[in-house]
Image (spheres, rainbow, N blue to C red):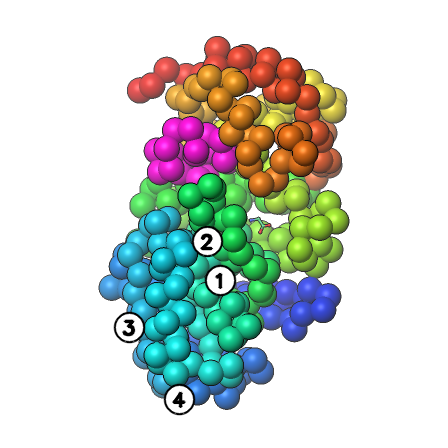
């Protein structure tokens, strides 16, 4: 199957390609050579993590070296803890020691953590050098590698420091998905479901029909799902690059409760995607009450999530603690919790929801939670 190319065109930014396909990682060097921003880069520094590097680092480096680049690499520990000031500081020092100059580039090879961390290090080093993203998880391919958000965590919360920095090229090599665990796969499927529900009937019904094939990791369906997500996200980001005019916030559908679940249950207890799916269900219940979403919509979304192996979570929390976590999220404004609510597929709005409504809904949510298996 030939690779699929999606061009991302964001006003004020150089357009860039997202190439999606089997083994496109082996051609990354040639494509970097054809990319104006790094065609003459003396060095391309590959940043990866301890899980991904043994699997794919040699392939990425070989392709870049064949294209004539000098290719040093840095491998960081796997996991969210690498998105720290300490690790980014080590990266900056290493980049300086390697003699990286402003015409050099960084290749982020890995999942969302590596993409965010390497993107942040590159976008701040010497006031910003070129970034290429080579996502290796479904979640990173369908969401985090496109659109230019980078970031690291603070004690006070996730992604509290970051930049907007569009990559110059995104290489989504679908063969890398073969090594994902079932949990990681479903995690990515949740972001696919989010994109479909927020985007359009066309995407939603296509996904509902193809959910079994996506769950079976059918290559053609996975490639189409990634491409549809990228097209959707590129369109949203083109309208609101820095999440400052109320459009990009739609990508946070399901995330208001999800962030509270992740924080209260301890990061890693549930995958990010499982928490997002729960947040989508919760938001749909709120939307039924507040903005007239029909039960047909609520149930159709629930059926889609079930079909993608994302059932209701055995999660309950003290409603006051969950509300407090939502208020501390960086998306809250002046102490008001904001939800992306959908009246129907593709028909969304941002709503500030009163505390007492949220508390009542959380109480009902607790009461209907499935028991732990
Ligand atoms: N992942 C949401 C965004 O990129 O805005």
Q: Which residue is mark 3?
A: 58
Q: Is residue 24 above or below residue 231?
A: below
Label 3 close to label 4 by CB (< 8 Å): no
Q: Which residue is mark 2?
A: 152
The mark that comes first in sequence, 1 or 4, is 4
Q: CA distance from mark 1 to mark 3?
A: 23 Å
Q: Nearer the viewer, mark 4 or mark 2?
A: 2
Q: Residue 211's mark? A: none
Q: Which residue is mark 4?
A: 68
- Does 274 lie within the magenta span? yes
Q: CA distance from mark 3 to mark 4?
A: 15 Å
Label 4 close to label 2 by CB (< 8 Å): no
The one nearer the camera, 72 or 157, is 157
Magenta part of the chain: 257-276
Q: CA distance from mark 2 to mark 1?
A: 7 Å
Q: Is residue 249 visible?
A: yes
- Looking at the image, residue 234 sits to the left or right of residue 116; the answer is right
Q: Which residue is pictured at 62% across the width and 26% down the height? A: 284
The mark that comes first in sequence, 3 or 4, is 3
Label 2 close to label 1 by CB (< 8 Å): yes
How far across and down, in percent of the image, does residue 277 sit?
50, 33
Q: Which residue is mark 1?
A: 120
Q: CA distance from mark 1 to mark 4?
A: 26 Å
The mark that comes first in sequence, 4 or 2, is 4
Q: Main secondary structure of the magenta part?
A: helix
């Amino acid at each position: 199957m030939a690779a699929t190319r999606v061009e991302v065109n964001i006003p004020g930014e150089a357009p860039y390609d997202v190439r999606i396909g089997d083994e496109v990682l082996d051609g990354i060097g040639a494509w970097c050579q054809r990319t104006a921003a790094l065609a003459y880069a003396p060095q391309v520094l590959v940043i990866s993590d301890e899980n991904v590097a043994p699997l794919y680092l040699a392939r990425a480096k070989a392709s870049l070296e064949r294209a004539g680049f000098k290719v040093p690499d840095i491998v960081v520990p796997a996991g969210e803890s690498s998105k720290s000031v300490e690790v980014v500081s080590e990266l900056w020092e290493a980049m300086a020691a390697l003699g990286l100059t402003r015409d050099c580039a960084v290749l982020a090879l890995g999942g969302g953590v590596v993409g965010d961390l390497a993107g942040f290090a590159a976008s701040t080093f010497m006031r910003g050098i070129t970034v290429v993203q080579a996502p290796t998880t479904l979640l990173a391919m369908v969401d985090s590698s496109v659109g230019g958000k980078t970031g690291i965590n603070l004690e006070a919360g996730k992604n509290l420091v970051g930049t907007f920095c569009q990559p110059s090229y995104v290489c989504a090599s679908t063969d890398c998905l073969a090594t994902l665990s079932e949990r990681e796969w479903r995690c990515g499927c949740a972001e696919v479901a989010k994109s479909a529900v927020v985007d359009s009937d066309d995407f939603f019904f296509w996904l509902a029909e193809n959910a079994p094939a996506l769950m079976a990791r059918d290559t053609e369906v996975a490639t189409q799902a990634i491409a549809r997500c990228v097209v959707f996200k590129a369109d949203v980001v083109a309208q609101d690059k820095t999440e400052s005019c109320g459009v990009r916030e739609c990508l946070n559908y399901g995330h208001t409760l999800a962030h509270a679940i992740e924080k209260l249950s301890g990061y890693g207890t549930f995958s990010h995607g499982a928490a997002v799916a729960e947040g989508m269900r919760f938001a749909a219940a709120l939307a039924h009450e507040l903005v007239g979403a029909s039960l047909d919509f609520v149930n159709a979304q629930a059926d889609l999530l079930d079909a993608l192996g994302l059932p209701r979570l055995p999660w309950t929390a003290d409603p006051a603690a969950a509300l407090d976590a939502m208020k501390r999220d960086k998306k809250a404004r002046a102490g008001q919790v904001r939800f992306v609510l959908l009246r129907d597929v593709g028909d969304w709005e941002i709503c500030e929801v009163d505390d007492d409504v949220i508390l009542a809904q959380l109480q009902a949510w607790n009461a209907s939670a499935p028991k732990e298996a």
